Image (cartoon, coloured by chain):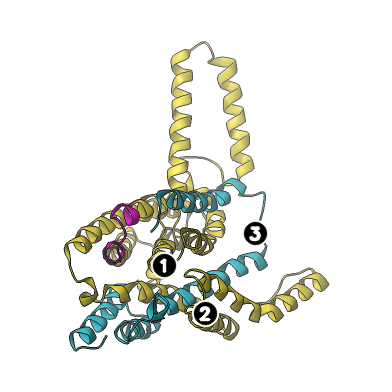
Chain colours: A yellow, B cyan
Amino acid sequence: MRILWRTTVPGPPLDTTLARDTGLVCLADGIVGVSFGAASVAGGLPWWVPVALSVLVFAGGSQIAAVGVVLAGGSPLAAVAAGAVLNTRLLPYGLAVADLVRPAGLDGDSRAHRLRGQQVSRHQVSRHQVSRHQVSRHWVSRRWARLARQLVGTHLITDESVAFALRQPDPARRRAAFWTCGVALFAVWNVAVLLGVLAGSMIKDTNAFGLDATFPAVLLALALPALNSRSIRVAAGTGAVLAVALTPVLPAGLPLLAALGGLASRWNGWRNWLVRVTSSEVPTGDPR
Amino acid sequence: MMPLPAIVVLAVVTYGLRLTGPLLRGRVTVPAAAERLFADAATVLLIALAATSALTEGHGFAGWARPSGVLVGGVLAARRAPFPVVVIAAAGVTALLRLAGVP
């Protein structure tokens, strides 16, 4: 779902613009979700597989990849591996929006500052309010509520919510954009997958509707914007040729992982980058 | 088949990747080379999966209808068509070709 937001118009950071863009992204993801649910059950998976993936994993690209591997006959292990590799990008996303994952009204821009603040307030509580059970309980429950919201916010880290948030000019709007987009997407995505599951289980001949073409088309659309240099195009092309060529001979799922061998074609880029970094100690330029 | 434990494992790994950022904020930075390697691995994987799921069925060729639809969708995506258009075009072209008797 990485590039959906790019199809929307980058405009002034007005709330109406945010609402409209969120709506457009929800619509686009909704259609992908319906096709994901429908194609999953059409391929022979039980209804709860796409539903559980959507609620628990909530990352469209990896869900489609995992189901794609399994529908092609691959092992669950290969499916999990493929999905996990696709989701490694969530790690840098998490770093980028770490402050926004916490709900509004909380202080601090740095982790250390927040930690200090928590220690101080805990100290104050223990000194002044330890006998006031009500206040203490209130404070504890608020702390749990805050932790719960933080854990929920973590689950809402997606391509779209991060992209929308980082486009906003100030922390308050960034936070609002992250939560608005994240919550809306979670609702729309899961309802859409459920609708797709219903539709897919009612349609008898799903091949007639070309549903099997939607997975590869979505994956292609997700990957195209990243093919922005010659070396990554060579790597991806090599990987694709490897995977298709090995499909007739290897057990399903393995050709996909063999495609990662395409990355070897970028070794010169890595080496040059490393040499440059170690010689100048200033990471400049793009290794591509 | 995708058993529930596999789904749970993928969910836990994914949540862990999401949580690492907020937990490490301010203490650790991902090396640029590692971040780029992640991004490149994901791109290579997406393209390879798109190719295999478009062209193959089991251990053999999937027929012409599906890859043709995917190709149309891919061209539209490269021209920055909106996502719904890409998805519907891919399914529509494939469905029409099958209606016309293309396997």
Residue A224 picture location, percent across and down: 45, 78
Label number found at residue B30: 3
Residue type at the position of mark 3: Val
Q: Is residue A208 left or right of residue A149?
A: left
Q: Residues within 10 Å of mark 3 (few under 14, many from 20)?
A: few
x 48%, y 36%: residue: A147
Instruction: Please name whichever residue, A198 or A233, is drawn nearer the observer in this view of the structure.
Output: A198
Residue type at the position of mark 1: Gly
Q: Which subunit holds the residue at mark 2?
A: A
* Secondary structure beneath label 2: helix
- Determine the image quadrant of residue A271: bottom right
- Judge whether residue A40 is colored magenta: yes
The quarter of the image holding the N terminus of chain A is bottom left
Q: Residues within 10 Å of mark 1 (few under 14, many from 20)?
A: some
Q: Which residue is mark 2?
A: A246
Q: Is residue B94 left or right of residue A241?
A: left
- Is tag 1's residue or tag 2's residue first in the polypeptide sequence? 1
Label number found at residue A176: none
As measured in the structure, the alpha-carbon distance from the residue carrying label 3 to the one carrying label 2 is: 34 Å
* Secondary structure beneath label 1: loop
Q: Which residues are magenta?
A: A35-51
Instruction: Please name whichever residue, B14 or A269, is drawn nearer the observer in this view of the structure.
Output: B14
Residue A249 picture location, percent across and down: 51, 78
Q: Which residue is mark 1?
A: A73
As measured in the structure, the alpha-carbon distance from the residue carrying label 1 to the one carrying label 2 is: 14 Å
